[in-house]
Amino acid sequence: MHWSEKLRVFACLCVLMTLSACGDDSGTSANDDDLSSSSVTLSGRSSDTVIPDSVPGSASSSSKKAESSSGQKAVSSSSVKKESSSSVILDSVPGSVSSSSKTDSGTSAGMTSSSNTPSSSSEYVPFDHSKTHAASWEIGENRYKTFVDPRNGRSYYYITITSSKTGKFVTVMAENLNIGEMVLGENNQNDDTKIERYCYNNDTTKCDEFGGLYQWAEMMQLPSRCNTESCADLIQENHRGICPEGWRLFTWDDYVVVRGYEDKYNDGVKGLRSMYRFLGTNQSGFSLTGAGYRDSRGKFKQQEQTVSWYYPEEHEYDVDLYARANYVSANTSHAPTRDDGDEKTNGFSVRCTKLE
């Protein structure tokens, strides 16, 4: 073979050997395997990446799998290394932003730093019972005092009222009692192992503002059977009932003292009622508010129109089913009388008197 032909054959062999070593565009080299592995780590979030899967809103395993299958192999190995070693993914945490949205605008779309903080208008603010009180210019400075019921940490206002007719005085709550576990108005308060209360319309914020509503036996802390049978033998002098320690249930005699306030305007029971949404003058300082009541059939009625309360006495009309009780209306001059009474299974407000 001529030397020139030998040279041409040798050159062709070199070209073929070079092509075999380099491979073609559709082949897979060792370097391609490395890049493919790195690309999957990136799109599937590498082991260096923090993924709070248990947080509501985090990506499911199926979405991670789809994300992994769509990873781009064209990413250079250097960019893969940088992304996988430094990125911390917190986009599934409420209020956090993904790395991509930070890159775009610094915050995620539609998200602000305050979006996860409830607005003040959505938070319930406890009712300020001083709103229901008489003005100091009407009853005198510093007449109202406070104490805390250690059973639930609730603070109450109270006031000492002296009868201008007899000179007798009582120290009484200037707001309704609020203690116990709420039960629905449709049910009786028949769990004798705990204090139960009704809240108007089954709304605990109404209890905060107006106090709880209680059946007679519940108020007395007697067995629930006492709502349907006489328990006269269980009634004690200075009966405490559900009042805090050192206090007792409000009685008719207490009412007589409270009603004996100095009546400057001759306005009768208006002087017992708060000026706050109850159309009174509150000359007495007693600060009655329109708590309404729960009737014996389980319906709530007359909030801001009336307030009713029991006394620790059964009513001779029917000692099994009735107890002595009074009510005051926002719209009439009706004054309670000694003989008033009502069914024990209603839900009425409770006031307490401090033991002297």
Image: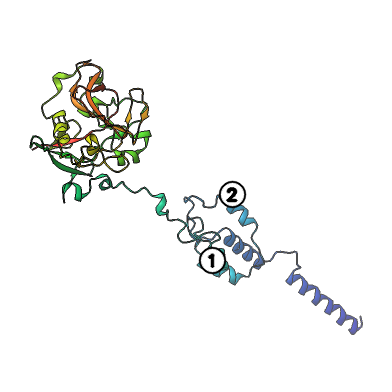
Residues at circles 1 and 2 in contact by the CB criterion of under 8 Å: no
Element marked by disc 1: helix
Label 1, label 2: how far apart the Cα atoms are: 25 Å
* Residue mark closest to the camera, 1 vs 2: 1
Towards the viewer: 90 or 145? 145
Q: Quadrant of residue 334?
A: top left
Q: Is residue 312 above or below residue 303?
A: above
In the displayed structure image, the side of residue 294 where residue 173 appears, left or right: left
Q: Tag 1: residue type?
A: Lys
Write down the residue under mark 1.
102
Q: Quadrant of residue 275?
A: top left
Write down the residue under mark 2.
62
Give the mark nearer the N terminus: 1 vs 2.
Answer: 2
Residue drawn at x 30%, y 43% is: 276
* Residue 144: x %, y % from top left: 18, 47
- Can you see residue 249? no
